[in-house]
Image (tube, rainbow, N blue to C red):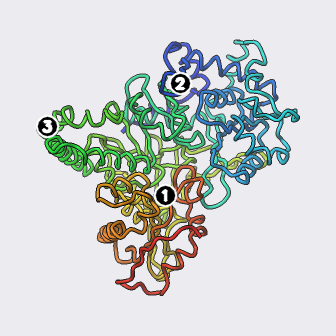
Amino acid sequence: MTSTEPLRQSVDGLTITKLLRRNAQEFGDRPALTTGIGPDAGTLTWTQLRAETAALTRGLGQLGLSRGDRLLIAMSKRAEHWVTDLAAAHIGALPCSTYDTLSTEQIGVIARHSAATVLVLEGEEQVRRWAPVLDDLPHLRAVVVLDWSAAPTDDPRFVSYAAVRNALPPDDAAFETLTDAVTTDQPLALVYTSGTTGDPKGVVLSHRNVIHESVMQEQLVPLPEHPRSVAYLPMAHIAERVLGIYMPICSAGHVTICPSPDQLLPALQKVRPHGFFGVPRVWEKLTTGLRTQLAALPEQQATALAQAQKTALEVFRLRSAGKDVPTELAEQLQTLDELALRPLRAAIGFDDCLRAFSGAAPIPTAVLEFLASVGLPVYEVWGLSETTGAATVSTPDVFALGSVGRPGPGIEVREAKDGELFVRGPVVFSGYLQADGDIASGTDADGWLPTGDVGTVDSRGIVTVTDRKKELIITAGGKNIAPTKIESLLRAHPLIGQAVAIGDRRRYLTALLVLDEEAAPHWARANGLPTTRLDELAVHADVLTALDAAVEEANAVLSRVEQVKRYRVVAGPWTAETGELTPKLSLRRRAIDDLYAATIESLYEPDEPNESDESHASAGKE
């Protein structure tokens, strides 16, 4: 592992503004930001990106944006989003990207709490959704609109992005003064949590936080100079904020913006990124697609691939157990990988990927093992918005299947008596933004942050996260059960896209299952079913038989009190828009309890489950 002191010294004195200047001076002609992947794709070099940032900085300053102010951005992933964010950073204001799935009510909560003085909106959709809350924002000075045709003509608060960008002539000296005035421990960004257990909290991150996180990742798992990456997650997500903005600035990398999730595969194939982070759902979908491709291969090719997969998995399991890999086996894998596995990865754009991480929620170990078997080992990381993303990192040298790695350099993790994990170190945030503009510390007097996650730290320092403390199921018999363990086992079956375990204050556990919208139709065709419609598959006898087997398989590795006694297949898919998931694709358990209240109650009627009971009938939302 990287030692703490050299990393600390490498971060001291650095800021995102100074690193952007370095990139423009030393790597000015290199690509920084590319939008799209087709013939209409446009690229900004580091020199151009900084020039655009300087122009918008002048205009925002003229609007009255000043140090300590908050600026909210409601915009899709596009170059202007990056420019706006970096311009605010030069002024010393706090930029905050908002999820495009927020309801008007949720927009109002964040806008009022942040006391934002400037909003930057993209176009008609954003103006329509934000308009109802504008008059309730007493601190608001200006609303900047990228697509000026979407702005109302009778509201003097509205101004076009182009007008702001072109408001003042260049003033290099003034911009350099702003660049130098920013300090390492100065607040840099505001990130609102998903709000799964209440109103979102405003997490304030400093330059030190994000630079330490970025440099730490680079030192733990080095990539080539100027690494390529794809930005596809929401900009409001802590992972994309670090991976899409700050880490590329630290490494002078090249980011390609993927505006829509349905363009991710073509983007990966075009960019061939050196590093990639995915939430479990992304890796699960990738696994489903690869399995489908493998199933369609001619027998001779499939046999060759199977041998290569077996060898790759054997090596992965040895390394996971902390054992040495015999030289002969390592050489055999290298040969098989070049012949069979690398071409498979190349087809999906992962042949140059050296750093593949999963986080934000537990991922089924079966998914990790499958990906490792095709030469794409994915390592789990763990952290929160409050820890600037990853606080622990699994690396090729030190990892354990089902765990989330060791604390990064300078970071400490300890267990409390009740099992809650606490974190301390330079990635721990500055504090929570208060409604009056103050920043309240989220740590105790010794700097320890309570994470709300329950887990363990073993003798090697490897952390295993069991569940969210507030999400533990406490049965009527007083047993504490981690639902994510159960849900991960259920989601390992290709038919199951989402699963939620139910049982708090109940006598036994049940589950709601949602069919995978991509895998289920493939499964139906492969098994000769007459339909591929999800609503029809959800009640088809063959599907339910397969799901019965999936539940039995999960139960086989669970203790008796953890086993699922009944389940229902409910309508899907679940998304942030339909209410069951957060924007980062975590379960909204309270919302699910409300949306499916009657279905859940039906799982406990009669109170004792009957072993022969047909308890898998489909049901929709209430």
Q: Which residue is mark 1?
A: 421
Label 2: element kind: strand
Question: For the point 47% across and 33% down, which residue is it?
Answer: 230
Lower position in the chain sequence, tag 2 or tag 1: 2
The residue that label 2 is drawn on is 33
CA separation in Å, label 3 and label 1: 41 Å
Mark identifier at residue 332: 3
Q: How many marks?
A: 3
Q: With 82 as the anchor, is 319 left or right in this view?
A: left
Dot placed on the residue nearer the N-terminal end, 3 or 1: 3
**x and y, in percent, of residue 270 in the image:** 41, 28
Residue shown at 49% from the left, 75% from the top: 503
Q: Which-is-in-front pick, marks 2 and 1?
A: 2
| Category of crowding for the residue at label 2, using alpha-carbon neighbours closer than 10 angstroms: few (below 14), some (14–19), many (at least 20) | many
Residue farthest to the left?
328
Image location of residue 27, percent across then percent down = 50, 15
Residue type for callout 3: Gln
Q: Earlier in the sequence, mark 3 or mark 2?
A: 2
Q: What residue is shown at x 49% (from left), y 33% (from top)? A: 8
* Quarter placement of the C terminus: bottom right
Q: State whether residue 547 appears in this view.
A: yes
Q: Residue furthest front?
A: 530
Left or right of residue 42: residue 280: left
Q: Is residue 149 above or below residue 134?
A: above
